[in-house]
Amino acid sequence: MRISVKAPAKINLTLDVLAKRPDGYHEVEMVMTTVDLADRVDLTLREDGQITLDCSASFVPDDIRNHAYKAAVLLKERYQVSQGVHLYIDKQIPVAAGLAGGSSDAAATLRGLNQLWRLQLSQDQLAELGAEIGSDVPFCVYGGTALAKGRGEQIVHLGTPAACWVILAKPPVGVSTADVYGQLRVDEIVSHPPTGQMLKAIEEQNFSLMCQSLGNVLENVTLDMQPQVRQIKDLMVASGADGVLMSGSGPTVFALVQKEAKVHRIYNALRGFVKDVFVARMLGAQDGEMLA
């Protein structure tokens, strides 16, 4: 038996850091939404109890360092499943890009194995398990648009934002999330994103207000570390994007656009500067679609 599950990328419409927690994590408040740039996770039942993984991207680890592999091990051990699984990840989301590709693969694995192994777990139970794998996994289990609090595991579901195009550009540099958070000085943050205003923009499907409300307190840290990220952001703004922001800890920057004519202009400008440029749409609503 074989199942295929979509694993969509996420972008941060806002990302605020409120405090450093005693457990070493940071207390965050962020609005995230899924876009239709997606990996695909194929899950094939194994009767020998083994967990194996292959990926279309050769540099992605195929062992416990991989979030999808970790998700399979966690489910198998927690529920004493005798069967195994072979995972194949068709990678379309750039790696280490601030788009939660690995977390989304893990969430897709949890959803797929819940069906493949007939565990009959609720979405909330899967999200709770996901929190043991990574901070973005609970959001990715649900998809759609949400406000995430705590270290990212406390999810408040939101409505669908105004429809728009999303142009994503990732420079050929790696950014360590741990390094970015390590250089962030929470008590020195001058400007916090207007999270309440973003929630209002989503509720009213107000595209203009959504663009005005974009904000990410990690952006300045990453911009200082990687000047190319700033160049991409400046290029998007100069090309007429309605709203521009770095996603997560970067280095991917995204532009929000309502008019299709602008999409082509911005895409072509970026393609002359970086190789990894993608055009997507916001999914907005929850989408745990099985592809069978």
Image: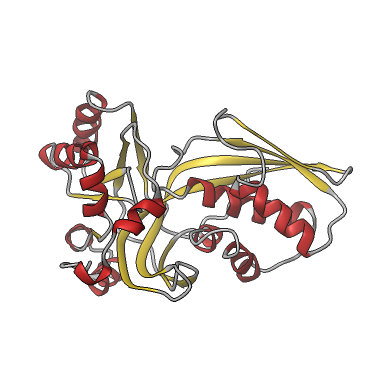
Vertical comparison of 200 with 116: above or below: below
200 with respect to 30 (left or right): left
Residue 80 drawn at (x, y percent): 84, 61
Where, quadrant-wise, is the C terminus in this rendering? top right
For the residue pair 106 and 157, the one nearer the viewer reads as: 106
Which residue is at a point 44% across and 67% down the rendered structure image?
A: 25
Vertical comparison of 278 with 202: above or below: above
189 with respect to 147 (left or right): left
For the residue pair 225 and 133, the one nearer the viewer reads as: 225
For the residue pair 147 and 179, the one nearer the viewer reads as: 179
Is there any visible trace of residue 256 in the rendered image? no
Vertical comparison of 15 with 246: above or below: below
Residue 278 drawn at (x, y percent): 35, 35
267 with respect to 59 (left or right): left
138 with respect to 228 (left or right): right
Q: Name the image colouring.
A: secondary structure
Where, quadrant-wise, is the N terminus in this rendering? top right
Residue 39 drawn at (x, y percent): 53, 40
Please identify the quarter of the rendering in which residue 24 is found. bottom left
Which residue is at a point 17% across and 44% down the rendered structure image?
A: 241
For the residue pair 54 and 223, the one nearer the viewer reads as: 223
Residue 163 drawn at (x, y percent): 31, 53
Is there any visible trace of residue 243 in the rendered image? yes
Total marks placed: 0
